[in-house]
Image (cartoon, rainbow, N blue to C red):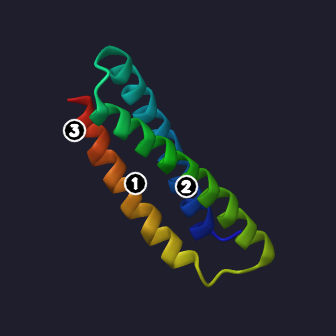
Amino acid sequence: MPFEDDVTLGIIFVNIILTVILFIIYARNYKTIGSKMVLGLLFFSAAFLVENILNFYFYNSLIAQGFLSFTTFILAVSTLELIGLLVLLYVTWK
């Protein structure tokens, strides 16, 4: 497995962890506040978590089958997601 694939899988895994953290924060906030906005954020984070888990699984499948033409694209998209999640976690935490 090339180094770029390891980096991509690592970034996707970090995205999963960050999404789990956001889900936990939103679940606690919903329990405390109970607003529709927080409920929406809770559902958003759950859907995004499923997306990231599927992304990890399918990217592993592509690597196993030898489809390497998507590597750069998936690395770029996963990196943008990582930046977005970090910003969202920062503003949520504050």
In the rendered structure, are the residues bearing label 1 and label 2 in contact, judged by CB atoms less than 8 Å apart?
no
Q: Is residue 29 left or right of residue 62?
A: left
Q: Is residue 1 left or right of residue 78?
A: right
Q: Measure the alpha-carbon separation of dots 3 and 2.
A: 22 Å
Q: Position of residue 17 (x, y in %)?
A: 51, 40
- Amino acid at pointer 3: Val
Nearer the observer: mark 1 or 2; the answer is 2
Q: Measure the alpha-carbon separation of dots 1 and 2.
A: 13 Å
Regarding mark 1 in the picture, which secondary structure is present there? helix
Outermost residue toward the front in this view: 36
Work out which quarter of the rendered image holds the C terminus and state it.
top left
User: Would you name the residue on which mark 3 appears?
Assistant: 91
Regarding mark 3 in the picture, which secondary structure is present there? helix
Residue 60's place in the image compared with 47, above or below, is below
- Amino acid at pointer 1: Leu
Mark closest to the chain's N terminus, 3 or 2: 2
Q: How many marks?
A: 3
Identify the residue at horizontal 31%, vertical 39% (top origin).
89
Residue 30's place in the image compared with 91, above or below, is above
- Amino acid at pointer 2: Glu
User: Would you name the residue on which mark 1 appears?
Assistant: 82
User: Would you name the residue on which mark 2 appears?
Assistant: 51
Q: Measure the alpha-carbon separation of dots 1 and 3.
A: 14 Å
